[in-house]
Image (cartoon, rainbow, N blue to C red):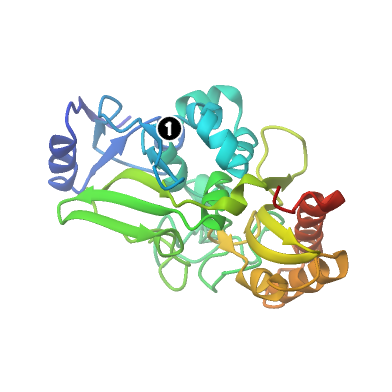
Amino acid sequence: MRPITYSRATDTATAIAAVSADPTSDFLAGGTTEIDLLRQNVLHPRRLVDINDLPLTRIEATPEGGLRIGSLARMSEVAAAPTVRERFPVICQALELGASAQLRHMASMGGNLLQRVRCSYYRDAESPCNKREPGTGCSAIEGFNRGHAILGTSEHCIATHPSDVAVALMSLDARVHTLGPGGERTYAFDDFFLLPGDSPHREHPMEHGELITDIEVPATPVARHSLYLKVRDRESYEFALASVAAAVSVVDGTVADVRVALGGVATKPWRARRVEDFLIGAAAVRDNFALAARAELAEARPTPMNAFKVELAQRTVVRALETLTADGSGSPE
Ligand code: SF4
């Protein structure tokens, strides 16, 4: 048993000052990851600053047609917001497929982006793990790695990023706004998630005490026709083996705009730019979807145990795009 100091912040500046002044402290939002890992002896904060009273819960449509989501908005609130359902169905679907109803009511959007990996070696608090204890090695590379990543891996870590909604937001060019000891910052979504490289313990570029305040989703007309397809071992309360966030518009049988991101197969939410580059201006047909998916997975580095994900991810991309374009439904109305 380790003693932990708990305090409840009433304003954002005080919360940031408290955490940045103490390297052993952490913010506490929904707690759906932090408390688990604390109990499992994986995280060892000596001080928790509860931020649930901070005014960071708004879910607003912007005049330009985008969205602004406060970092403390709950997953369930965002999924239920009419403007999100209407303009960005891929976000709603990713949220609803992302966790049980109880967890969606508790978990915050900012916490969702920062949730830690589900690698069992990371979470057992004993096995060598470069993410938990830098320099100790990676137990998964030669271990049980059926669910691990095939894209964006390094010789130091192959853990899959676990978030679903981050995949949807990656496909939409979202931005992350933060406030910290160095003032306000804005990160492009792709820059916010770091590849493991030789420092897998660094998962994002924020400094200690920096707090996500908002997630901004720019106006994306194609997103009105979008979906999130998640393939997993069972139909509920399970992480993705492969998932696809996709949006597409088709004009006269040709792909006019397309967004695709992958989950369950990469060490960060994975923007499938090769798929997009291949398909823009191409005929919206299955053969092209399959060729585009193959191009994206060409650099996959699977292990013998998770090699099935290469084919699975390609098929999931094809199925998502076929679903969106069936009966010409990818065409603008
Ligand atoms: Fe740790 Fe990453 Fe290896 Fe899992 S895959 S044991 S999180 S270093």
Taking depth in this image into account, of 44 and 28 the one nearest to the observer is 28
In the image, what residue occupies the spot 49% across and 32% down? Answer: 78
Which residue occupies the foreground of this view, 91 or 133? 91
Q: Position of residue 69 (x, y in %)?
A: 40, 39
Left/right placement of residue 277 relative to residue 87 reads right
Depicted 72 relative to depicted 261: above or below: above
Question: With respect to residue 6, does 317 lie above or below?
Answer: below
Label 1 amino acid?
A: Arg
Location of mark 1 (residue) = 39
| 305 horizontally vs 114: left or right | right
Q: Residue at x 71, y 32 (%)?
A: 236
Q: Position of residue 331 (x, y in %)?
A: 74, 54
Q: Is residue 181 left or right of residue 45?
A: left
Q: Quadrant of the N terminus?
A: top left
Residue at 36%, 38% (x, y): give it. 71
Relative to residue 49, is residue 253 depicted above or below? Answer: below
